[in-house]
Image (cartoon, rainbow, N blue to C red):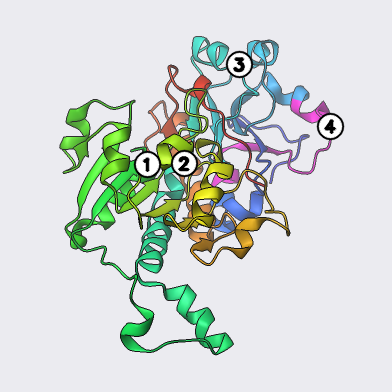
Amino acid sequence: MTDSTSASPKPVVLLRPAPQKRDRIFTPEALARLDAAFTVIDLEDAPDDALFEEHLQDAFAIVGQPDLDADRLTRATSLKALINVEGNFFPNVDYGTAFARGVRVLGCGSAYSQAVAEFSLGLALDLARGISGQDGAMRDGSEKYVSESAGDAILLHRAAVGILGYGNLGRSFHRLLQPFHTTVRIYDPWLPPAVIQETGGIPAGLEETLRSSQFLFVFATATADNAHLLDGTALDLLPDGARIILVSRAAVVDYDALLERLQQGRFLAAIDVWPTEPLPKDSPFRGLANTVLSPHRAGGIPQAFHSIGDMVVDDLTLMARGLPPVRLQAAAPELVGRYRNKPVT
């Protein structure tokens, strides 16, 4: 990596990837490519803002999401790209000023899509057939054989599926459902019906989606408008025995209402995201036999992390040549201020 004393005509990249780690998202090969094409000011271990402020005016790109108010963005006179490498856009940036100054705000959320989609499919099959539950039963000696252990099993094949949120995650998952010949209703108020219809889905309102779903997949991001979208009233619309797969943002769900209905045996759930992480040791969710628990690990696998670094290098290289980025996802000015996601630690 280039240190702060090096002089070079190459564009300056400020690398402050927290809460990510540099070596988690950049392979040695990707770091070498980045360093060959840019003057990289590595700020991962810089505890204060002195170096950041020193190089801010010359920065071509910022990789990470440090605090960027209007004053900082105004002083970043060479800035062309702000690249979030955590996966969520946080409210610590004056996005209006960034867009007004022609700064591209880019995110890496699509890097996680395939990993989350495959994990979601695994959770659905587990809930359908009791795979992890029967593994536990065999380990403690309480198993029952053949049909005695499969009385509540159902097929994903030709099932009625509901998807809440049809962004990167929802679309990646929908493609995995094709061999199962499911009927898929999709609720996403940010999309016109034609977009959903073109993918073979059925655009539907929230109530219709919930009432019809044997399997419900929650991929919605957290916004200012959908906190506790799945509250008690909404959860009561689900049919008895439904399977709920939660792999997106915890804020979308009222977990107290969810817990109450799971304790009543109304449906089954697989949960990868939690309002408080780590999940408290005494959480009543830990004692539910009808729930598959997961510690927020659907997307965070090495292949997904490494793809982030490759995407960053590829798009910065294009932008340095005066071309638009093609791999990272551009934030929409109309939407980025609505997100209410929290950093994943």
Is 35 in the magenta? yes
**Looking at the image, do the residues carrying marks 2 and 1 touch, with CB atoms under 8 Å apart?**
yes
The mark nearer the N terminus, 1 or 3, is 3
Q: Secondary structure at mark 3?
A: loop
Left or right: where does residue 177 sit relative to residue 322? left
Instruction: Please state which amino acid type lies under the numbered disc 1.
Output: Asn
Number of labels in the image equals 4
Would you name the residue on which mark 3 appears? Answer: 94
Would you name the residue on which mark 2 appears? Answer: 109
Q: Secondary structure at mark 1?
A: helix
Up-down relation of residue 106 to residue 144 (above or below): above
Would you name the residue on which mark 1 appears? Answer: 168
- Rendering quarter of residue 82: top right
Mark 1 packing: few (<14 Cα in 10 Å), some, or many (20+)?
some
Q: Spatial distance from mark 2 to mark 1, Cα to Cα?
A: 7 Å
The picture places residue 322, in percent across and down from the top left corner, at 41, 25
Q: Residue at x 69, y 10 (%)?
A: 71
The residue nearer to you, when weighing 265 against 49, is 265
Mark 2 packing: few (<14 Cα in 10 Å), some, or many (20+)?
many
Would you name the residue on which mark 4 appears? Answer: 48
Instruction: Please state which amino acid type lies under the numbered disc 4.
Output: Asp
The mark nearer the N terminus, 4 or 3, is 4
Instruction: Please state which amino acid type lies under the numbered disc 2.
Output: Gly
The mark nearer the N terminus, 2 or 3, is 3
The picture places residue 263, in percent across and down from the top left corner, at 54, 56
**Looking at the image, do the residues carrying marks 2 and 4 touch, with CB atoms under 8 Å apart?**
no
Q: Residue at x 52, y 30 (%)?
A: 227
Look at the image and give the residue range highlighted in magenta.
33-52
Q: Spatial distance from mark 1 to mark 3, Cα to Cα?
A: 24 Å
Mark 3 packing: few (<14 Cα in 10 Å), some, or many (20+)?
some
